[in-house]
Image: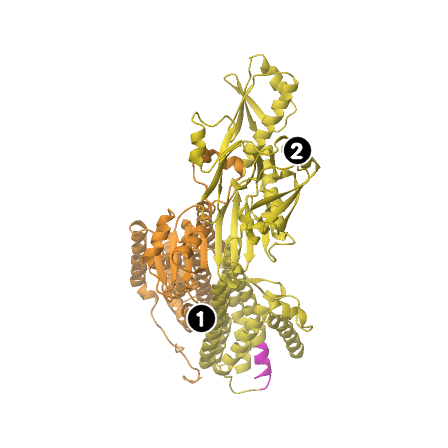
Chain colours: A orange, B yellow
Amino acid sequence: MAAGKHFELISPGTKIDFIGRWKICVAISTLVIAIGLIGFWKPGVKLGVDFAGGTEMQVRFTGEGEVSDDPIRGVMQSLGIESDAVVRVGTGHEFLLKFRGERHIEAPAAEAAAPQEGGGEITAETDLIIRLQQELAKQIGPVEVVRVEFVGPKVGEELRDQGLAAIGISCLLLMVYIAFRFTPRFAPGAVVALVHDVAVTSAVWIVFGLEFDLRVLAALLAVLGYSLNDTIVVYDRIRENLELHTRIDLVEVLNRSVNETLSRTLLTGVTSIVAVGALLGIGGEVVRPFALAMLIGILVGTYSSIYIASPTLLWLERRRARGGAPRARAAAKA
Amino acid sequence: MRLRTRILAVAGLVIWFGWYAVGSFFPDAQRKAVWWLPDSAIRLGLDLRGGVHIVIGPDLEVAISHELSVIEDGLRRALERKNVTGTQFLASATELRVKPGASSDGAAIREALEDDQRVTQREEGGELVLTLTSEWTREVRERAMLQALEVLRRRIDDPQTGIPESVVTRQGQDRILIEIPGVDRVPDIFRKTGYLEFKIVQDMAPTEELLRAKHPDGLPPGTEIAVEKERKTERTIAAYLVPERADINGDFLTDAQVQFDNRLNEWQVSFTWNPEGGQIFGELTEKNLQKPLAIILDDHVYSAPVIRDRISRQGQITGRFSSEEARDLAVVLRAGALPIPVQIEEERTIGPALGQDSIRRGISASAVSLVLVIALTVGYYRLSGVYASVALLVNLVMLVGLMALFEGTLTMPGVAGLVLTVGMAVDANVIIFERIREELRSGRTPRASIAAGFQKAGRTILDANVTTMITALVLFEYGTGPIKGFAVTLAVGLLTSVFAALVVTRILYDVHPGSKPVADVSI
């Protein structure tokens, strides 16, 4: 077939030496993950309301005139609410309030009687959020609730544990699947790529001081699936090429496989990024963290299936070969 | 299968799912009115339609201490019958200590407890320490949970003021999930415990300080102060000296209704006692004529009218209510009190404006990504790209149709999953097309290349999609609320996209170039 007949991103004969660049790539990835780990210690991981507990309340003032954040802080202070942040969002009439505090629904008389004897104050409104809403309306002007996210400390802790468990269990199940579907020798390479993707995406998240919440967790899990999907397509080709070309050196087989699947890897990457990009640009603030984490994850996942998954396989094979008697040949006969 | 059969089968599926998909774009009422529209449709999650999602946790430890006090009462009565006196009881949250008045009483106490399977006993320094057995503890907690659920359900199902479409469900062992669409704050009927007490007022003063000043040596034993405040301003109206134990409580109520008193020009709640309650209340009011009776709900004195007459079956609660307040109070009284205190553990409220905004943005994002992805695919693969785009559209119709058929809930993360499906669904086609191109390059005929491409790509596509499916299932299992919606659209989207790529695209190739000997295939 004549060249140029198909519209091609990558021409068929392309032979880029991806495997040869493994040292640089491993260095870059290690560096990013290392920075992430340092960030884990020093500024620390920022947890959103979902995992840390607390309240995020977005309100819109519908009255005339400018509203600034100082009076809002004042109202919160007068209610004894410890405010973590008051941030103006969107059009200027909207504010995001972050604060802590427990929420009790009124207790039965029998239980509440005790503190009252000490002359404790009984307030008509016991719920923190509704009270804040009432006071804002009274002292500043008509106000509308856009969104409230409240997570109690117990639930926050549970969501955190469940989130970590979800990532752990996904990795485990994926490993089992790879080991079962391919030979167990392929599994470690895929898992390294997997852990790499989650680690690098998280590292970027930590370095830029972004908050982890349920949406980011969902994105990380989707990234796991996407990245492994990518890796499997490459591994499938490696398996096929190993069967076809038993004589060629393993490095050559790996390079050939990555090159042969390159246009698919890139094209799927591009359509996925286009879709996620639309979500990021148009989807609004509710899905923004998800879309951003997904975007980073797809980029990292595409990179890792080209530059990380196969070199890891090569490295593992060489180690295995070194353990056995002759060196390269044995590896090639995989 | 023959081509014609395959075409008919797929067309049938697409029309069927498409019918469901179309139905979801009509509002509920309209869909039910129009005969040709399906019954089921996609439900919108609270984050898209606006509403309150709260998880509350009943304090089950209180149920345990309640149970201990029930056991204490029983033991007291049993000892009274045996004429054993001087026994002291000391209850804590988890155990009941019984101290015999005389050392010889120990045997009598143990005898009184003999058939009680609810507690385990041990001796400690002459005291008998009672704790609930682990089975009974479970039983008590379970009972408290069921009661709390029942009370909350009765409140939302209330025929007069209940909230339609609200749902109260149990979440795990010790939580209750309440979903209320169309509101932007937790309604009052969920926030009241509903513990109603009536107490005869023994003394009163305009403020708590003045009342305390009247009793310089401290309050008489067994009494406490209850304060009546104006609810809006929280200004104290009066302070009352009342007994600690209620003279009668709301457990004996059978009904409560809102009524308007034309004479006083205000809203009231009238209530009806059951026979036993009527008798107690009758005696109480007869004995205390001309004394004020404090009506206390969840520690707030609503009013303290003076008893003019013996009242037995029916009475009114006054308290300068607005019509809504009176209505809510009636609902809470009808449904009964929550057996134990509850706490809000999680709340997710989305105002209706944000929900509308999210829907609009979700639709735009889906449309834009669809157009861009189709443009990319057609630009890259030409006619084959058109096939892939048709497959993508079929895929979306099936995804939406399946969601509607099973009345799935669409959330904003679910919309994100949909958009992601648009981006990733072409992957299967890309794998196939790349294979076909390779086969063409190796010199095969177009027809052979297409057949080989589909055959070789099949395994890879399956392998690659199982992985995303695994993470989607884990997310479904561990995710809560809206995040579950993401897992659902992602998982369903995977199934439909594999089907669309392998079956729909194949049919399109079989139609054109078909079996004709062609020189080339547009790919």
Q: Is residue A91 left or right of residue B440?
A: left
Rendered residue at 55%/79% (across/down): B448
Q: Are marks 1 and 2 in contact (CB under 8 Å)?
A: no
Q: Which mark is residue B423?
A: none
Residue type for callout 2? Ile
Q: Tell me which chain the residue with mark 1 is part of.
A: A
Name the residue tied to disc 2. Answer: B280
Rendered residue at 45%/54% (across/down): A149
Per the rendered image, the range of residues in magenta is B506-516
| Mark 2 neighbour density, 10 Å: few (under 14) some (14–19) many (20 or more) | some
Q: Is residue B22 above or below residue A31?
A: below
Residue type for callout 1? Ala
Judge by depth and name the residue closer to the eye, B130 or B523: B130
* Residue B150 visible in the displayed image: no
Q: Is residue B43 above or below residue B227?
A: below
Rendered residue at 51%/63% (across/down): B48
* Residue A29 visible in the displayed image: yes
| Mark 1 neighbour density, 10 Å: few (under 14) some (14–19) many (20 or more) | many
Q: Position of residue B207 (x, y in %)?
A: 44, 37
Q: Position of residue B430 (x, y in %)?
A: 48, 73
Name the residue tied to disc 1. Answer: A275
Q: Tell me which chain the residue with mark 2 is part of.
A: B
Judge by depth and name the residue closer to the eye, B446 or A135: A135
Count of labels in the image = 2
Mark 1 residue element: helix
Mark 2 residue element: helix
Residue B510 belongs to the span the image colors magenta: yes
Q: Is residue A248 above or below residue B160?
A: below
